[in-house]
Amino acid sequence: MTDQALVELAFSMLERSYVPYSHFPVGAALLCADGTVFTGCNVENAAYGSTICAERTALVKAVSEGRRDDFIRLAVVGNSADYCWPCGACRQMLYEFAPNLRVLAARGDGKFMAVSLSELLPYGFGPK
Ligand code: THU
């Protein structure tokens, strides 16, 4: 799957976001080595801290379906002027399973940047 196609899948998740508090929808798409994609959106809560981000939604969907060690690329998108980078909690959660993950961060106009998770979380704390 191309980077562009993965980013588009993440954009298609924006309409599923449940964001009555921030009004900031985020979409994610996590690609496995065999081509399987797990999508996610942010799901907010009246108790704000219980909110789950789009990337972690995608990740826990994948892990709960038995995937662990074949994540290769993640797209994360928002309707924002700047690139929608994963938050610190999401970086840490992703690092547990895929420290070498390639991350595509997109902004509202569809442009995206590609970086590695190790760039986003250098010297990360992981299972090793
Ligand atoms: N959000 C994500 O979904 N992913 C991130 O990495 C950053 C933040 C969501 C959480 C909340 O619903 C909204 O964006 C505003 O913080």
Image: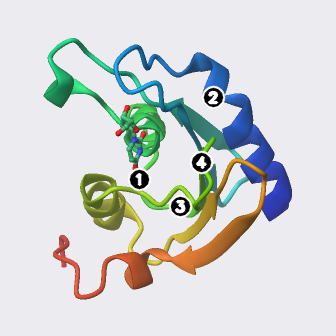
Q: Amino acid at mark 2?
A: Leu
Label 4 CB-ligand 1 distance < 8 A: no
Residue density around tag 4, few if under 14, some if 14–19, many if 20 or more, within 10 Å: some
Camera sees residue 1? no
Between the residue at mark 4 and the residue at mark 3, the CA separation in whole angstroms equals 30 Å
Residue at which label 3 appears: 70
Pick the quarter of the image with the C terminus: bottom left
Instruction: Residue at 84%, 51% (x, y): give it.
Output: 5
Q: Which of the pair 16/94 is nearer the observer? A: 16
- Residue 68's label in the rendered image is 1
Residue 54 picture location, percent across and down: 46, 37
Give the mark, 3 or 2, whose residue is nearer the N terminus. Answer: 2
Vertical side of 7 occupied by 18: above or below: above
Cβ–Cβ under 8 Å for marks 3 and 1: yes
Between the residue at mark 4 and the residue at mark 2, the CA separation in whole angstroms equals 12 Å
Which quadrant of the frame does ligand 1 lie within? top left
